[in-house]
Each structure stands twice: as structure tokens, then as C-alpha cells.
């Protein structure tokens, strides 16, 4: 990846985008459009179709018709595998193009975006392509006069709603297993980052996916997203996003056809550093990246830092030194470590959080302000607050920005209490040289993923999902196939 290649892709224009339904680019029925504002400079990049309930209905009807026709749903797993592998190859071939397009849309720094978006999507698509012809049904342990078979079958039409921080990565976590299992899919991308998912659907068609199996309808969550969630012919809804929206989606399921709803709703993840941390410098560096990469816009971001008193001063000195060296700026310039906040609205929200934390009595150690305002883009300095009490909103509420809450603890019991003092339970980390401490903390912390002497870095082989108000869906791993398939029993008298 060379800067000259990035610059050449940045210079290309982006044409106004339409929905992709039945393999054809189409305008919204009402003709409405939404501006796409690039967080790099605050300027309009292009426009997207602003879909409504009619557009969603058209896409769902197509998806149902294709599903019932069986061209994909009844294709042999080996055939679906061949198409998905071609799909992965095409995504890989266009990886830099997709990464640059995504950065122009949502502001993630290119070094992170390239790996976390197209290359992660490639790995995910290949994983489920390779897995699907190796997943077997079951034979029940019945008496000799009966044969009990348990078949695994696709569910039908899957609705997918993804957030703007990593639309390709998170989209692939849902789209790939749903397609591999034989379902048809309707995707409602985030209005603040739709471009790469539209391009992904075009590449899927080029790979040989039958028209209508993967459809993309852009528009607002309040209109297109709600219509997808309420649709009577959507069998499954897979969502990553905010808690309030997740609650509404559950209500919509009850109001419509009791569709299955799988939710990943973010977190307020604790990062716990014990005095016997093996390498303070490494832990400080990883901890800084764990909260500040992508301007803190990561669902598993380590946004609560707990440091044991015996190492607190030394660790905080290292953390501040690392943070002070982070370079924030143009996300398409390889010279910078951190890019832009996704939108002006999100930046305003982040700055309001800083003001509130100061009013609550938090001690701001660094950051807290907007950067590069003259560029027109949305940039924010990495911000650290010390002395954060577990009763403060900064400790309990997800910011989704580059703001870290820090407190100290005395012993393991104290650490567990503070770590679990949250309505969320998505991820966590523990830094210790003691295997016993590590195992005890993994069991004690209420989180779907607990890292030990690391933060992040899990791959598609293990599930991701949360406890408590972080939701109950599970992306990644073979377990994700359970969300897009059903078990059917055949009870055969012999």
C-alpha cells in the first residue's frame, strides 16, 4: 500500500449511488436522496438514494421470490462455496479501492481501514465458504425401529442493519454466514457509510451470486431500517448498533411476524492492569490503541481503564507518553495514526461528554478539544480523564469517541467490582503475569470476550457478542451459522 496509490484513488469522483435490487441499480420510488458528507473535510462526497418502506418492500419481495425459487437456497453447499470463494477473491482484488472509498465515507485511518474492512471481509467470506460444506446434520440416538434425523436448513430472508464504524467488516460477519447457509439477504447500510456495502454487492454479483440473493437499500434508519424490521416477510434481523435502536427492533419483531432478532449493542469495556503486568510499556501502547484507534469508534474499545495502585503512576506516565505521540489528521495520509470522527454530530456529542465529565469532577489529563477545524473535517484530540468514579456517567455510558475514563483499584476483588459496574458486557482485558489471576478474572468479568495481556486481535474463528445490555447475538465462528439456519426433525418409522 503506497501513498501514491491512495492519492490516485482519492482523486476519483464518486457518482451518485442507487439501491441495488435484483442485481439492478435503481432509484428510490419517491426519488429522494441523501448527501454523503466526508468527515475528512466536511464536504459533500456524493449522494445516495434515500429509501422508504416501498423500496424495502420491493427488495424483500425479490429476496423472497429468489429464495423460494431455489437457485441459491437449494444449491449444493459445494456450489455456494465456489461462488463465495470467487466473491472473496474479487473483494481482495479490489481491497485498496474499497478501503479508500470507505475512508472517504467514514473517516477511519487508512492503515486500520485496509486491514479491518476489506481484508477482514475477505477472511470472513472465505471462512464461511470453506465451512458450509463441512457442517453436518445429526442422527438421533433412537431405538432400532425409528430413524431420527436433524436437518439444518436456511431460514429464508435475512435483514441486515450495520453501523458506520466498520460497515464492511461487520457487514461480512452477518452477510457471509447468511449467504453460505442459503438465505437471501437485504442489507440496510448506515446512512453515514453506505458506499462500500453497495460496492460489495456489485462484486458479489460479478462472482456469480444470483440476482436478488443480496440486495442493498440505502436510507435512514428511522425510515428504511424501521421498514425492514417491521416487514412481515423478513425471517431474521441481524443488527449491530445502539441500545435504544436495538430495543425498538425487538418491539418491531413483536409487532410484526415475531422474526428472530440478533443484537450486538456496543459496550463500555474495562481494561484492567495489575501490578504484575509483564511489560508496562507494551501494555500502555496497546491500551492507547485499544481506545484511540478509529477515534474511539469501536464497539469493543477499552474505554474504562482500571490500574492497580502499585503501578498506577508508572503506567499512567507511559500511557500519557504514548498518547502524546499519536498523530491525528487526514485519514488517507499514511503519516497519521488516527483519522476523523465520523460526523459533525458525533464530534459535538464527544465534546459535550468532555464538558460533562469536567462538571462531574473528572481530572482531564490530556486532549478534550477539536483539532484541525480549519480543514472543515471532524478531528478530536485523544482525551484521558483520571479520578473517574464508578457513579459518573463517563464510567457508565458509552461515548463512542476518543475519551478514556481512568480509575485505580487496590486488589482483585476491587477490580472485579469496578469492571462489572456497567450495564454493558461486550469485551474486557486483563494484564497480569499470573495465570491464576488471569483465569479468575476471565471467569469473574461479565463480558463476551476477555483478552489477557492483549486488547483486540481476535479473528473469525471465535464468536463475538455480549452479556447484559450489550445484546445477545453472536457474530463470527461456526456458532454464527446457528443464527441463519434452523433445525428440522425427521422422525422415520422403520
Image (tube, helix red, strand yellow):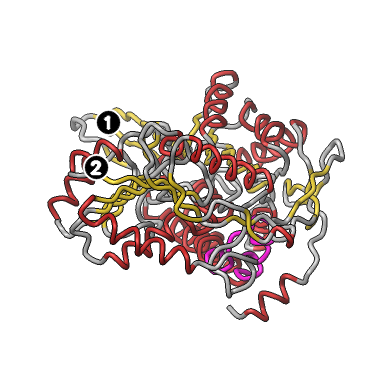
Residue nearest the viewer, comparing 1 with 232: 1
Name the image quarter holding residue 98.
bottom right
Residue 111 in the magenta stretch? The answer is yes
Residue with the mark numbered 1: 494
Query: Of the residues under marks 2 and 1, which one precedes in the sequence?
Result: 2
Residue 416 rendering spot, x and y as whole percentages: 24, 39
Instruction: Characterize the local packing of mark 1: few (<14), some (14-19) or many (20 or more) Cα atoms within 10 angstroms.
Output: few
| Rendered position, 199 above or below 427 | below
Q: What is the magenta range? A: 94-113
Residue 450 as seen in the image, left or right of residue 185: left
Name the image quarter holding residue 381.
bottom right
Q: Main secondary structure of the magenta part?
A: helix
Q: Residue at x 50, y 36 (%)?
A: 359
Residue nearest the viewer, comparing 341 with 390: 390
Quarter that holds the C terminus: top left
Residue with the mark numbered 2: 415
Residue nearest the viewer, comparing 58 with 277: 277
Q: Is residue 488 visible?
A: no
Amino acid at each position: 500500500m503506497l501513498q501514491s496509490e491512495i492519492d490516485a484513488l482519492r482523486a476519483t469522483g464518486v457518482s451518485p449511488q442507487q439501491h441495488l435490487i435484483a442485481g439492478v441499480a435503481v432509484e428510490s420510488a419517491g426519488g429522494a436522496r441523501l448527501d454523503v458528507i466526508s468527515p475528512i473535510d466536511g464536504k459533500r462526497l456524493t449522494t445516495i438514494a434515500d429509501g422508504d418502506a416501498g423500496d424495502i418492500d420491493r427488495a424483500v419481495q425479490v429476496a423472497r421470490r429468489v429464495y423460494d425459487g431455489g437457485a441459491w437456497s437449494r444449491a449444493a453447499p459445494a456450489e455456494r462455496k465456489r461462488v463465495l470463494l470467487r466473491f472473496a477473491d474479487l473483494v481482495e482484488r479490489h481491497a485498496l479501492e474499497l478501503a479508500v472509498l470507505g475512508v472517504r465515507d467514514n473517516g477511519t485511518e487508512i492503515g486500520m481501514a485496509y486491514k479491518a474492512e476489506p481484508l477482514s471481509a475477505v477472511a470472513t467470506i472465505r471462512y464461511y465458504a470453506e465451512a458450509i460444506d463441512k457442517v453436518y446434520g445429526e442422527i438421533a440416538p433412537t431405538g432400532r425401529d425409528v430413524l431420527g434425523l436433524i436437518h439444518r436448513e436456511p431460514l429464508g430472508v435475512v435483514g441486515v442493519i450495520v453501523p458506520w464504524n466498520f460497515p464492511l467488516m461487520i457487514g461480512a460477519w452477518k452477510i457471509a454466514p447468511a449467504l453460505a447457509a442459503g438465505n437471501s439477504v437485504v442489507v440496510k447500510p448506515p446512512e453515514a457509510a453506505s458506499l462500500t456495502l453497495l460496492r460489495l454487492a456489485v462484486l458479489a454479483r460479478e462472482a456469480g451470486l444470483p440476482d436478488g440473493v443480496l440486495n442493498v437499500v440505502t436510507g435512514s434508519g428511522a425510515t428504511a431500517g424501521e421498514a425492514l424490521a417491521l416487514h412481515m416477510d423478513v425471517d431474521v434481523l441481524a443488527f449491530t448498533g445502539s441500545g435504544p435502536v436495538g430495543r425498538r427492533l425487538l418491539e418491531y419483531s413483536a409487532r410484526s411476524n415475531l422474526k428472530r432478532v440478533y443484537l450486538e449493542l456496543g459496550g463500555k469495556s474495562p481494561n484492567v492492569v495489575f501490578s504484575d503486568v509483564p511489560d508496562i510499556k507494551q501494555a500502555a501502547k496497546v491500551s492507547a490503541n485499544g481506545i484511540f484507534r478509529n477515534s474511539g469508534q469501536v464497539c469493543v474499545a477499552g474505554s474504562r481503564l482500571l490500574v492497580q495502585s502499585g503501578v498506577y503512576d508508572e503506567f499512567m506516565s507511559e500511557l500519557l507518553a504514548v498518547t502524546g505521540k499519536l498523530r491525528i489528521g487526514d485519514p488517507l495520509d499514511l503519516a497519521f495514526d488516527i483519522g476523523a470522527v465520523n460526523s459533525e454530530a458525533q464530534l459535538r456529542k464527544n465534546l459535550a461528554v468532555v464538558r460533562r465529565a469536567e462538571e462531574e469532577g473528572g481530572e482531564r489529563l490530556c486532549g478534550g478539544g477539536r483539532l484541525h477545524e480549519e480543514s472543515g473535517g471532524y478531528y478530536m484530540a485523544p482525551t484521558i480523564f483520571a479520578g473517574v468514579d464508578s457513579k459518573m456517567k463517563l464510567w457508565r455510558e458509552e461515548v463512542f469517541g476518543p475519551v478514556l475514563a481512568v480509575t485505580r483499584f487496590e486488589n482483585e476483588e476491587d477490580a472485579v467490582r469496578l469492571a462489572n459496574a456497567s450495564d454493558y458486557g461486550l469485551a474486557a482485558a486483563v494484564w497480569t503475569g499470573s495465570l491464576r489471576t488471569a483465569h479468575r478474572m476471565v471467569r469473574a468479568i461479565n463480558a463476551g470476550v476477555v483478552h489477557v495481556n492483549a486488547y483486540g486481535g481476535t479473528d473469525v474463528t471465535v464468536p463475538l457478542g455480549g452479556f447484559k445490555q450489550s445484546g445477545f447475538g453472536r457474530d463470527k465462528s461456526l456458532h454464527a451459522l446457528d443464527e441463519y439456519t434452523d433445525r428440522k426433525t425427521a422422525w422415520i418409522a422403520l
